[in-house]
Image (cartoon, coloured by chain):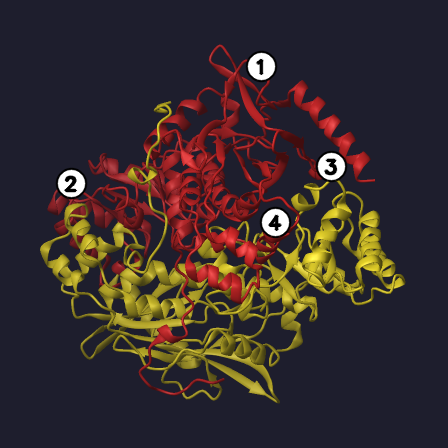
Chain colours: A yellow, B red
Amino acid sequence: MPLLGRLVVDYKNYMINDFVSKDDLPFFTTYGRFITAEMYLKAGFKNTWATFDLFVRDLPEGRNFLVFAGLEHVVQYLQDFKFTSSQVKYMKDYMKLSPDTIKYLRLLKFSGSIHAMPEGSIFFANEPVIRITAPIVQCVLFEQYLANTVMLQTMLASKVARLVNVAKGVPISLTVIRTHGVEAAIKGMRAGYLVGCSKMASPILAMRMKMPPSGVITYHYFIQSFDKEEQAFEIYAKNYPGKGWMLVDTYDMDAGIKKVINISRRLGSNSFKGICIDSGDLIKHAKQARLMLDKAGLQHVEIMLMSNLEEYKIDKIVKQKTPVNWFGVATEVMTSADHPKLEVVYKLSEIIKGNNVIPKMKLSRSKATLPGKKQVYRLERKGIYQEDIIGLEKDKVKGKKLLHQFMNKGRLIEQLPSLDESAKYYQSQLIKFSPKIRLIERNYHYPVTISKSLRVLAHKTERLIRNSSK
Amino acid sequence: MPLLGRLVVDYKNYMINDFVSKDDLPFFTTYGRFITAEMYLKAGFKNTWATFDLFVRDLPEGRNFLVFAGLEHVVQYLQDFKFTSSQVKYMKDYMKLSPDTIKYLRLLKFSGSIHAMPEGSIFFANEPVIRITAPIVQCVLFEQYLANTVMLQTMLASKVARLVNVAKGVPISLTVIRTHGVEAAIKGMRAGYLVGCSKMASPILAMRMKMPPSGVITYHYFIQSFDKEEQAFEIYAKNYPGKGWMLVDTYDMDAGIKKVINISRRLGSNSFKGICIDSGDLIKHAKQARLMLDKAGLQHVEIMLMSNLEEYKIDKIVKQKTPVNWFGVATEVMTSADHPKLEVVYKLSEIIKGNNVIPKMKLSRSKATLPGKKQVYRLERKGIYQEDIIGLEKDKVKGKKLLHQFMNKGRLIEQLPSLDESAKYYQSQLIKFSPKIRLIERNYHYPVTISKSLRVLAHKTERLIRNSSK
């Protein structure tokens, strides 16, 4: 292998930059979509508009609902969308796009409208969460980023929501060491915040949110750095009194707790915030730890549990009335390891040529889509949501309309809620569903139906397509 | 919910920036690690150095080997590591770190050494892929980024390698629409390139690599935009002749292929690069399509198969001698959906106080670690690798040393290979293992043992720790 020997070199010569700036995002698509854009232009679709729906085809096994997240990034992306001059040069030199296509793309800005559910909305399979109406060439270029950013954040918000629902008020701290990258970590913590995990262990997001970070545990290597475990604990008791969580299972849990107790006797009962248990039978250990601490008069010293926790383990811990004040969760949750993807799709629902609106749909049995400009109506009775109806925008269905118009002619026309407002909105919505929606051990199917007018349009559209495609 | 009505607003006021620049990375850690740094300084560890190993604890079920990737980003991160003035301000105002800690951190630069396997190396559980020796306060701060970036890229390189191994030379195109973010997409495509997927459908990485993008298929919505399927195909035949892959299953596969044949008769046999099948029984459909195309004299028109492909489906397709020229893979592979995580850990192996080197290890039965400065030796016989030995650096084991020193005193001292060189290195290594390593349907356990001197050191260290921690 060509290792060139020992010399001082500058990696920047051959480094492939992996940082993503807003300038990069218009190229987060495929070459095939650029050629599609060119083919549309060649076919005379320059002034043709279209409506596309972004939705999730199926809820993953075991998920009773999803929490919509990522709209803020979609809006940012659409507002900023513009090719840089070096991207335009790449289109010429490497993509070999035609001069007409380049001329069209180099000035392209988003000029369409966006209807969307507000972030924090609870939604179900096949319900559009974003509806975009724009020149069709634009719609093609936006697909990949919209699907990507909505998938990641919605998947993680929906996953963390399950943990919050079973933790019954015990706070959850999110660790992002093994997410799929730093961007995924930031978006994952943001998604967690949306559904109620408001403490930030990682300063990379806490600083952006202008909030203090939190959650200090001792790490194994800190404890191992000393000859004796109690030396490590003492450093925290003396220099960070009352705020640290001592990891007590590096060597022997009972012995670890006894050291915490002894130091508290010697240096004061407010030496530690809590203890942390990271291995073994968490329920048994927590009960034992609580007894030992209480007996020593340390009722205020809290217990944090971690060790590959997910919603099923947390549910079991809570149901067994385990004394626990914090849960620490990590990779299992922040990669949504049981379902690390959502089938987020972006489907054509109509073509608009001047005043002529042509509904469109896919026919294939397992992947059929719904035509037309749609709206989702949520019906409420006695303060509880009963049913969603996917209908046409022009339908006269009673019920709350879930899709709001946020952008028109490429401009934001309705202020996006802040993340705190979205988090409150999520909570306000969650309690209006049957409590069964919050169960994790069995499925609850919230009813979603299709309005009569939409069914009629779908039948009509299907007939038209079958006739013309013969 | 507080939607403030219709007005033109600027989202930037409340936007949480989700872009990651190199300046952000030093904050990609936890508050707890900053406090650990402070506690180390309080405890007099300012000039204490340590060695940490980065390794994967277990191979995921079904994986016979892993491919190391991400070193380039680790080196970049370490070379660039420096807190910005606003981060320093945050440390004061929000983290409330002591003036001494701030003074130490504000000037902190990486000053240690890095031994690592070159990217593209094949490795196994418990083998250190990166060994870092540096002031212990630095080591603490680097943990999260190192584990994160190595996990993501190694996981994806190792996943894609499995597909390449069973595809038997049929090229694979990677689609990144539903990765966990844009960074994960870029790193995933880079990882794919490393193990042999050298075509780039996405310009976001192709442009950075100064290579043309490739792979143009028709999308369903393009076909749906016309009254008749053949109109869509004709646009490609006329304006992008010989380069496009026609998706033939939007309505009816046989009818779709017949339209491709008719247009080829009318406009020339070089109208299309190929056809693309995205649903149904791919093996049956591909065989049928090949027959139809060949009969029409279109032997050169290729067949691409997609539809949630992963290594098991590809293996079956190839073993059934299916006529296929390209595979398109997406979410299933690029999220490593069957194993979306690796247990990448970063463990203390020694503490260095002046001339005093104190080996360290974790004792717990399931998570024990190995002490000391280690090296991995790979033994070869008749051109085939036989066994790896994890030993001490000073061991006199015959065999290739897998860990190279890339950095010393914070500087790069050995040029990193280019991505192309790393890709060649991977191929050159793969063929030196038993072909059984490439099987996906059953496990092959390549032997990895521990050298005698390392076992002796581990026993000695364990005794010492057990005695002193009593």
- Do pointers 1 and 4 mark residues of a single chain? yes
Calculate the distance from the C-alpha at mark 2 to the C-alpha at mark 3.
67 Å
Mark found first going from the N terminus, 4 or 3 = 4
Q: CA distance from mark 1 to mark 4?
A: 37 Å
Marks 1 and 3 on same chain? yes
Going by the numbered disc 1, the residue's amino acid type is Lys
- For marks 2 and 1, give the CA distance: 62 Å
Instruction: Name the residue beneath numbered marker 4.
Output: B41
Distance from disc 4 to disc 2, alpha carbons, whole Å, reads: 71 Å
**Closer to viewer: mark 4 or mark 3:** 4
Name the chain under label 1: B
Question: What is the x, y in percent for residue B14?
Answer: 41, 74
Q: Amino acid at mark 2?
A: Asn
Question: Residue B329, image x and y in percent?
Answer: 40, 45
Residue B355 left/right relative to A3: right
Residue A146 is at least partly visible in this image = yes
Which label is found at residue B363? Answer: 3
Q: Secondary structure at mark 2?
A: loop
Q: Is residue A217 left or right of residue B299?
A: right
